[in-house]
Amino acid sequence: MKIIDLLNLMVIGEDLPKKIRYEDEEYYLTSDEETYIGCISHSAIGRRHCLEQCLTDEIEIIEEDKPIEKIRCGENNSLMPEQLRADLYCLVDKINELIEEVNKLKKESDM
């Protein structure tokens, strides 16, 4: 996302990420939701605090709600006893089913 996109979200009143990263520094959204303040430099990014030359710079949203990734079972399980390997694959399948269900519930709650 670019800084200009973030400023546009501010102007139209969309939900803003609480924390972003810009030029290797983390910025937190202030309580008035009009400015991000840098943790280290205390510099500001916001409606009244942005230079024209930085509008197209990229930022990273830190707090983005991402789905939980499924786990994978390693391919190098040939040294494991067969029953233990079967139990491991069964557990991995069950955990992945739970991950799918949690992701589905998170998506439904966002709507």
Image (cartoon, helix red, strand yellow):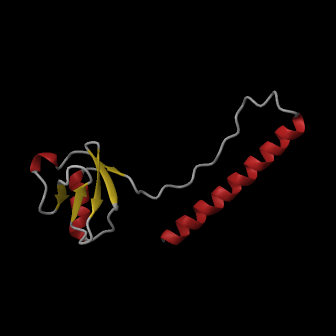
Q: Nearer the viewer, residue 103 or 50?
A: 50
* Residue at 13% over, 58% down: 49
Q: Is residue 62 above or below residue 107?
A: above
Q: Is residue 56 above or below residue 8?
A: above
Q: Nearer the viewer, residue 38 or 57?
A: 38
* Residue at 46% over, 59% down: 65
Q: How many marks?
A: 0
The picture places residue 111, in percent across and down from the top left corner, at 48, 71
User: Of all residues shown, which one is farthest toward the front?
Assistant: 40
The picture places residue 58, in percent across and down from the top left corner, at 26, 45
Image check: 56 left or right of 82?
A: left
The picture places residue 77, in percent across and down from the top left corner, at 77, 31
* Residue at 31% over, 49% down: 21
Judge whether residue 104 can be spotted in this image.
yes
Image check: 41 left or right of 68?
A: left
* Residue at 10% over, 51% down: 51
The picture places residue 103, in percent across and down from the top left corner, at 58, 60
Q: Is residue 35 above or below residue 51?
A: below
Q: Is residue 65 above or below residue 53?
A: below
Judge whether residue 59 can be spotted in this image.
no
